[in-house]
Image: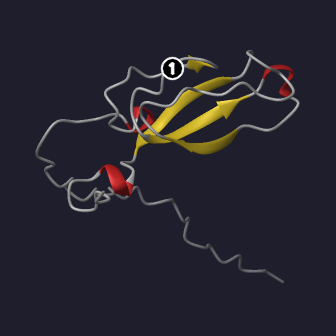
């Protein structure tokens, strides 16, 4: 008795070319995200007692990591405050500028 073996087709992966969509053209200067468009070089930090150069949102990094990094709003003209726990060893880094509403010409408080 003869047993007929059936042959099966061999499947080979098909290489497909993935076409990527064209990137939209962005006009204007390119600003890295980490600078927040603040004009400050990335990684510039300020210490307690330094004057706040621009109103905005600042990342706060505490010494000895007694507290997780967090964000605060600081106003230009103020001074960066010391931390109650790490005193002068706290550092501030500008995440992005954000003008204080009452420093905007359309919303200035009248005397």
Q: Quadrant of residue 30?
A: top left
Mark 1, secondary structure of its residue: loop
Q: Residue 76, position in %: x, y?
A: 42, 34
| Res 91 → quadrant | top right
Q: Position of residue 98 (x, y in %)?
A: 39, 48
- Left or right: residue 88 versus residue 80 is right
With 3 as the anchor, is 72 left or right in this view? Answer: left
Q: In this view, does 69 lie above or below 26?
A: above
Q: Nearer the viewer, residue 45 or 43?
A: 45
Task: Name the residue: 83% across, 21% down.
Answer: 86
Name the residue: 33% across, 57% down. Answer: 18
Specify few, some or many for label 1: CA neighbours under 10 Å numbering under 14, 14-19, or 20 or more: few
Q: Tell me: residue 56, above or below residue 19.
A: above
Q: Where is residue 90 in the image (x, y as percent from the top left)?
A: 71, 22
85 left or right, relative to 80: right
Q: Residue at x 54, y 19 (%)?
A: 45
Most extreme residue toward the bottom, as rendered? 1
Q: Residue furthest front?
A: 111
- Compare residues 99 and 102 and report the one nearer the observer: 102
Task: Residue 25: give x, y in percent of width and height.
Answer: 13, 50
Question: Which image quadrant: the N terminus?
Answer: bottom right
Q: Left of 95 or right of it: where is 40?
A: left
Please name the residue that numbered disc 1 is placed on.
Answer: 43
For the C terminus, which image quadrant?
A: bottom left
Quadrant in which residue 47 is drawn: top right
Q: Which residue is drawn at 37% across and 23% down?
A: 40
């Amino acid at each position: 008795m003869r047993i007929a073996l059936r042959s099966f087709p061999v499947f080979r992966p098909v290489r497909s070319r993935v076409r990527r969509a064209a990137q939209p053209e962005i006009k204007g200067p390119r600003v890295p995200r980490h600078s927040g468009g603040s004009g400050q070089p990335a990684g510039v930090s300020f210490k307690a007692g330094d004057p706040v150069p621009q109103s905005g949102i600042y990342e706060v990094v505490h010494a000895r990591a007694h507290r997780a990094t967090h964000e605060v709003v600081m106003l230009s003209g103020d001074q960066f405050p010391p931390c109650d726990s790490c005193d002068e060893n706290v550092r501030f880094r500008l995440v992005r500028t954000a003008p204080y509403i009452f420093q905007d010409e359309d919303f200035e408080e009248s005397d």
